Amino acid sequence: MEETKEKTYNKIKTRLSIIDIVLDILLLAILAFSGLSHFFADISSITSKDYINFLIFAFYTGLFFSIFGIPLDFYGSFIIEHRFNLSNQTFFAWLWEKLKSLLLTIAIGLPVALVFYFFIKKSGHLWWLYFASFLVIFSVVLARLAPVLIFPLFYKFKKLEDGEIKEKITEVLSKANISISGIFSFNMSKDTKKANAGFTGIGKSKRIILSDTLINDFTPAEIAIVFAHEAGHYKHKHIIKNLIFSTAVIFLTLFVCGRLHALTVNAMGIPSISALESLPVLMLYLSIAGLLIMPLTNYISRRYEFQADEYAVKITKDKESFISAMEKLAGLNLADKDPHPAVEFFLYSHPSIKRRINAARNISLD
């Protein structure tokens, strides 16, 4: 039987994801244990300022990963997206978006990296405790500021005009007893034909965002139920639960990886856990830990998605719009409606469309 377009697209994307994960771990292992990190540390130690030397070391390691990562990223995010007619970007538009992402990563990542290096230099084996505390606070601040400072760097946002869509969303908000700062549309179509929606921000920056592709291709009833799904996340306190869970994961992961890092550094004869050549060892352990935790985080995420789906169907009492919305999302995003169970278990943060539709059909509206 001939493979469908959706199956082919997702098979390629899955393979690229696996290659990316394996490549990152392999490159980190080479960097950590081949002597390459010692070479980078030597050519980085050109000043009497430890923090400047650290930044030079970070530049060399980043360049090392970019040599392998950029071609893979270009193939996955530009070539494949165009091959399957999902992207609206020209090459220069793609390049500009990547440049903005790089500059933003530097602007955010540089201070975080310097804070990490400060703690690992000054706090000894308790560095993980201070850095984990910093990361939790920083992530909350970032979530608060992202809708107003970061997202507008990539998309144009405008308040949703009065009309049937806004009326239906307002109706859901009223039923759910949710207050927000505004409902906004954004020009996702400049990059892709895919559609998306969601809650963003926390506190006073909390808002609803709807892609223009969603507004253009979905009925008001379908948009309302997509939004009701997002409201379900809010009503089930998934944001708070994820924050608590991620906080526990951050502390536990940094503690375990910090201990393994210290033992490995000692066994390798490296004089200090803050020595530049020792840092790729820590990054390797953190990457492996992230890979091991990923099935658990994806499992929890899929459970939350089912709960949000159930809330959306019950509050709107509109199974048919939910099913048609899922079918449209699958079509626009070229989603594999029925992926291999192992692929879904390890890599999917959302349940397959087939499972979501089947679950929705079984929801009682009494």
Image: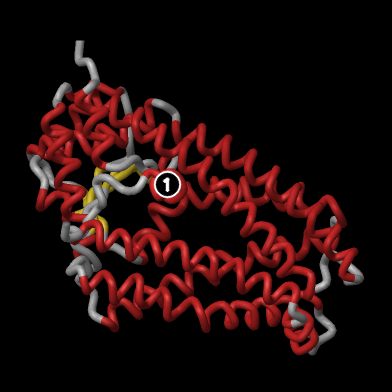
Q: Decide: few, some or many residues near mark 1? Use Cα within 10 Å; few <14, some 14-19, many ≥20.
A: few
Quadrant for residue 92, please give it. bottom left
On screen, residue 68 versus residue 190, left or right, reads: right
Could you say where residue 199 lies in the image, as x and y percent from the top left?
A: 34, 42
Above or below, 7 against 183 in this view is below
What residue is at 77 percent from the left and 63 percent from the top? 118
Q: Secondary structure at mark 1?
A: helix
Above or below, 243 against 99 in this view is above
Q: Amino acid at mark 1?
A: Ala
The quarter in which the C terminus is drawn is: top left
- Identify the residue at the far top of this view: 366
Q: Is residue 158 visible?
A: no
Quadrant for residue 189, please give it. bottom left
- Identify the residue at the far front of this view: 1
Give the residue at mark 1.
Answer: 342
On screen, residue 262 versus residue 14, left or right, reads: right
Q: Is residue 284 visible?
A: yes
Between residue 46 and residue 254, name the one nearer to us: 254
The quarter in which the N terminus is drawn is: bottom left
On screen, residue 34 versus residue 312, left or right, reads: right
What residue is at 79 percent from the left and 81 percent from the top? 38
Could you say where residue 316 lies in the image, as x and y percent from the top left?
A: 18, 24
What residue is at 87 percent from the left and 57 percent from the top? 124
